[in-house]
Amino acid sequence: QKEVEQDPGPLSVPEGAIVSLNCTYSNSAFQYFMWYRQYSRKGPELLMYTYSSGNKEDGRFTAQVDKSSKYISLFIRDSQPSDSATYLCAMIPRDFGNEKLTFGTGTRLTIIP
Amino acid sequence: NAGVTQTPKFQVLKTGQSMTLQCAQDMNHEYMSWYRQDPGMGLRLIHYSVGAGITDQGEVPNGYNVSRSTTEDFPLRLLSAAPSQTSVYFCASKAQGLNTGELFFGEGSRLTVL
């Protein structure tokens, strides 16, 4: 079993819809949680970062962490065609320092105009 | 400000050939790493370095070598290419001591081994 599980999709939704992307994990030591966005044929770029449990909002994006359920989510409101990309969750354990990220496999998202 | 630069962008090799993927960053980051990305497997860490002269293995190090003689450069060497090494390779760097986990990625190097 992988440490981080992510539904690979693909996921297609109409423009303006609310998108929910999710990851589950098995390592209870994970303490830092991130979402990266990767456009086609580009490198990933950091979208959201959260520490421990709770919500964090940045514009149309909300990251949610539920450590009791080992479950993290990324919500995109008022989705736009420019949001079409692959979204990868990533995590770092509290006991390793701050170097090794463990990534999910990524969810490919398409926003239909 | 170029960020993380990878060369070449595309490469085709024959089985058994060797080559080096170059990575350079101009952000004075201490930490640099190499990942490979394969369909259904996500990003897997190959090797990483926390500073010049210091390297360590990641999740999938077999068949690859790295060295770190300067802060800026972190080349990845394929010793004897195999078809299983067909992948997209990403170099990434980050600043030490910042608790954000933000890796800055290059645009990738697409390698095909025949």
Image (cartoon, coloured by chain):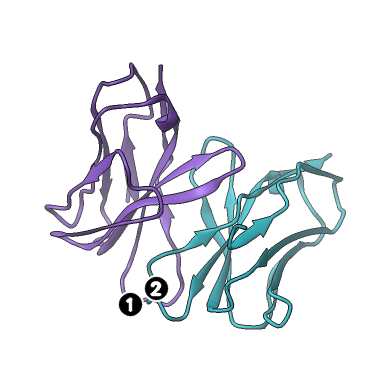
Q: Residues within 10 Å of mark 2 (few under 14, many from 20)?
A: some
* In front of the other: A77 or A50: A50
Can the viewer see residue A60? no
Spot the cyan chain and give its letter: A
Of tags 2 and 1, the one toward the viewer is 2
* In front of the other: B101 or A14: B101
Residue farthest along the front direction in this orientation: A1
Q: Are marks 2 and 1 on the same chain?
A: no
Instruction: Identify which residue is drawn at 63% across, 70% down.
Output: A26
Quadrant containing the C terminus of chain A is top right
What x and y, as percent, mark residue B68?
17, 53
Quarter-wise, where is residue B62 in the image?
top left
Using the image, name the chain to which the residue with label 2 belongs: A
Can the viewer see residue A108? yes
What x and y, as percent, mark residue B43?
50, 49
Residue type indicated by callout 2: Asn
Tag count in the figure? 2
Spot the purple chain and give its letter: B
What x and y, as percent, mark residue A43?
48, 45
Residue type indicated by callout 1: Gly
In the picture, measured across the screen, residue B27 lies left or right of residue B35, that is left
Q: Residues within 10 Å of mark 1 (few under 14, many from 20)?
A: few
Query: What kind of element bears circle 2?
Result: loop
Which residue was labeled with disc 2? A98
Instruction: Identify which residue is drawn at 70% across, 46% down.
Output: A8
Which residue was labeled with disc 1? B97
Q: Is residue A32 above or below residue B88?
A: below
Q: Is residue B65 above or below residue A29?
A: above
Q: CA distance from mark 2 to mark 1?
A: 8 Å
